[in-house]
Image (cartoon, rainbow, N blue to C red):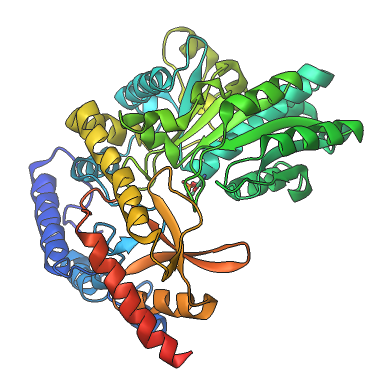
Amino acid sequence: MSNKPFILSNKIEDKKEFEAMINKTMASFFRTIDDERAFSGINPYVLRKEINDLGFLPEKGIGFDATMEKVEKSILPNLLRTWSLSYMPHLHSPALMETISSELLIAAFNDSMDSWDQGPAATEVEEAMVHGLLSLYGYKDGADGCFTSGGSQSNISAIIAARDWYLEEKFGKDVKKRGIGEEGRLLRLYTSEISHFSMDKGCHILGLGYDAVRKIPVDERCKIDVDAFRSMVEEDIAEGLYPFAAVATIGTTDFGSIDDVKAMRIICDKYGMHLHADAAYGSGAIMSSKYRDRLGYLSLADSITIDFHKMFLLPISCSALLMKNGKKLECFELHADYLNREEDEEDGYINLVGKSMQTTRRFDALKVFMAFQTRGKDGFDEMITKVIDNADYFWSLIKDDPDFIVPVKPELSSVVFALSDGDEVNKRVRRRLLENGTVIGQTVMDGKVMLKFTLLNPNLGFSDFPVLIKKIKEYRDMEKERV
Ligand SMILES: Cc1ncc(COP(=O)(O)O)c(C=O)c1O
């Protein structure tokens, strides 16, 4: 084994080596980010060849400096630059600076969240942040929560908890021990036709199948049609099915539309259903004093998904699931002699593995802690209000322009629109923008190709939008001639 330092530790030579590595890494990073574009525009086949040519596992290690050279030459210039003002296709944000420092600390310590003895302060920070979040989103005593790897995992965890709880309450079934049984096959979950596909994925993983997901139509504002929801539940009950849960989307992926939690609560209460709020996108709006009311009565939901790697501008990945009745999270509790002994827990050595579907888990809560401390309520208020203002402004610029179709007024920071020249032109304009380093979104509404701005970057200002509109129209004119 080489006698060069290789594990970061408290030894002086390790510290020096690591400091040099970090300096080289930062120098490479800075050298490659002068380009304002979101993407180099490289052709995928050319990039694939270049990456494959880098090699897989050399017989003899080439050392850090030579590795960094390869990374700087072929990888960094062709990464997506999330901070670029030309990047707006997805719910995929740039990262607040202090949270990149947090990532360094998370990796350097490499603590894990499963047991207290693998992350003493990490466990306490996560618990403190969870309790702060419970109160921020209006939950009271008895609530609990856990950090997860993302909105999908938060949603799926909520569905597991809802399923187990329902089968236990209604049929006295111990799902952990005996599985979902005959009744499980008749369970139904209700969510809007434009909700995130993690609901379908979740029902597949849970053995309920896609058919268990009942898709509720949306109205012209892309919100759940509550009357249709009620009718679907009642029809299903009449057919002998078991509606066990519903999911309100608080910020749909494309439109940012927000379902009416209060109205859905009434139906869920009547039929003993768990109501989950998928606020992966919209959760950030709680920070905006101007727009927070748009979220509606979020605290009426039984559980809430919060994604910090969307509106909150934290590095991937960072999410949390909040549960109004914390006992529902016990569905994930399981004890192992080597890991989370009950006698330790009685003495205060809490082990968060009991609240999560993961075992080894990152200390993502540090990112939230450092961002919240650094920016405060005022900082987040300003950033999140700004991105919603931007969406509103862009919408106001194009809503009466005959060159564009804009079907839905934005509630959060996304605007779905199309050039009024048909699908082919819209597709080609997006592709041409991509090849020139501007990355915008593309989706489908009522069978028509639509374009999308997902505006998460608070550095974008009102003056940027007329420039973008001009560029889109220029590309439209070029592409129209070719179609
Ligand atoms: C509404 C909604 N829910 C859930 C998710 C999934 O979140 P993640 O990508 O963090 O798993 C997304 C992703 O965009 C989303 O838009």
Q: With respect to residue 1, does 135 lie above or below? A: above
Q: With respect to residue 10, does 398 lie above or below? A: below
Q: With respect to residue 469, does 226 lie above or below? A: above
Q: Residue at x 24, y 27 (%)?
A: 377
Pick the quarter of the image with the N terminus.
bottom left
Q: Quadrant of residue 412?
A: top left
Q: Position of residue 403 (x, y in %)?
A: 41, 71
Asked if one can make out residue 284 in the rendered structure from this viewpoint, the answer is: yes
Q: Position of residue 357 (x, y in %)?
A: 56, 35
Q: Position of residue 479 (x, y in %)?
A: 41, 86
Taking the image as shown, residue 194 lies to the left or right of residue 60, namely right
Q: How many marks?
A: 0
Q: Quadrant of residue 205?
A: top right
Q: Quadrant of residue 162?
A: top right
Residue nearer the viewer, 223 or 282: 223
- Residue sticking out furthest to the right: 239
Taking the image as shown, residue 180 lies to the left or right of residue 84, namely right
Q: Residue at x 36, y 33 (%)?
A: 291
Q: Residue at x 12, y 40 (%)?
A: 11
Q: Residue at x 32, y 58 (%)?
A: 397
Asked if one can make out residue 339 in the rendered structure from this viewpoint, the answer is: no
Residue nearer the viewer, 450 or 186: 450
Q: Position of residue 2 (x, y in %)?
A: 21, 60
Residue nearer the viewer, 26 or 275: 275
Taking the image as shown, residue 39 lies to the left or right of residue 191, namely left
